[in-house]
Image (cartoon, grey):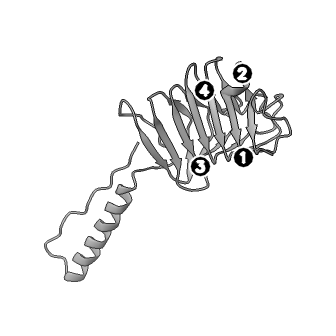
């Protein structure tokens, strides 16, 4: 949800210096608003039928469901954390996010629903000791995921990073780093460690 900042009311008794300062503050507000950032704690409310874009700043965000086609969520900083499960119920691109398990979320960090493709770019997935599920779960054989430059951390008690009931071509990892030691699961890997 975008946050909107109000401009200051004009005070007719203010000095010239006060007017210049107010105009400067208004200019800064306009620049911040033009970034269309989503503040920590906000939910990602997809108001358009398609092509929703979110730029999340550093901070903690709840998970939730993204269900509109071609939604793009980009992390503005290195600490744009999602601590609850993301349900991805349409074609979505997630870029520069930090997905982590928490006391409220021991389930998969991201679930790709039936018939959709999700692209993760430069994301970090981190499971805690208590978490027994996968990092990414593909719901059906028609779900697909592409992960580019992602890092997978944490001693997940599952057998692999990915739960893929489909073929290896449905999950492609490019230039990713598996720090769990569990392997990627049924997938295609290119230049991964």
Q: Residues within 10 Å of mark 2 (few under 14, many from 20)?
A: few
Q: How far is disc 2 from disc 4 in space, using C-alphas?
A: 15 Å
Please identify the quarter of the rendering in which residue 11 is found: bottom left
**Residue drawn at (72%, 46%), measured in percent from left and top?**
175
In this rendering, the label closer to the viewer, 2 or 4:
2
Mark 2 touches mark 4? (CB < 8 Å):
no
Q: Which mark is residue 21?
A: none
What residue do we see at 58% from left, 37% from top?
119
Tag 3 and tag 2, C-beta contact below 8 Å: no
Q: Earlier in the sequence, mark 1 or mark 2?
A: 2
Marks 3/4: CA distance? 18 Å
Q: Answer with mark 1 or mark 4, whichever residue precedes in sequence.
A: 4
User: Where residue 167 is drawn, which disc sits there?
Assistant: 2
Residue with the mark numbered 1: 175
Residue 182: give x, y in percent of width and height: 84, 35
Q: Which residue is mark 4?
A: 112
The mark nearer the N terminus, 3 or 2, is 3
CA neighbours of label 4 inside 10 A, class few (<14), some (14 to 19), many (20+)? many
Q: Is residue 72 left or right of residue 165?
A: left
Q: Earlier in the sequence, mark 3 or mark 4?
A: 3
């Amino acid at each position: 949800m975008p946050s909107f900042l109000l401009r200051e009311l004009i005070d007719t008794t203010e000095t010239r210096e006060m007017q210049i300062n107010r105009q400067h503050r208004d200019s800064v507000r306009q620049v911040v608003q033009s970034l269309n950032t989503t503040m920590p704690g906000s939910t990602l409310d997809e108001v358009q039928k398609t092509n929703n874009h979110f730029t999340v700043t550093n901070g903690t965000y709840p998970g939730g469901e993204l269900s509109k086609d071609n939604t793009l969520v980009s992390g503005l900083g290195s600490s744009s954390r999602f601590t609850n499960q993301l349900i991805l119920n349409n074609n979505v691109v997630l870029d520069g996010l930090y997905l982590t398990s928490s006391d409220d979320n021991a389930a998969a960090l991201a679930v790709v629903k039936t018939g959709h493709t999700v692209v993760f770019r430069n994301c970090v997935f981190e499971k805690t000791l208590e978490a027994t599920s996968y990092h990414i779960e593909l719901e059906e054989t028609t779900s697909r995921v592409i992960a580019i430059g992602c890092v997978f951390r944490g001693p997940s008690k599952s057998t692999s990073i990915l739960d893929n009931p489909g073929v290896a071509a449905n999950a492609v990892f490019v230039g990713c780093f598996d720090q769990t030691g569990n392997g990627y699961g049924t997938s295609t890997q290119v230049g991964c460690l």
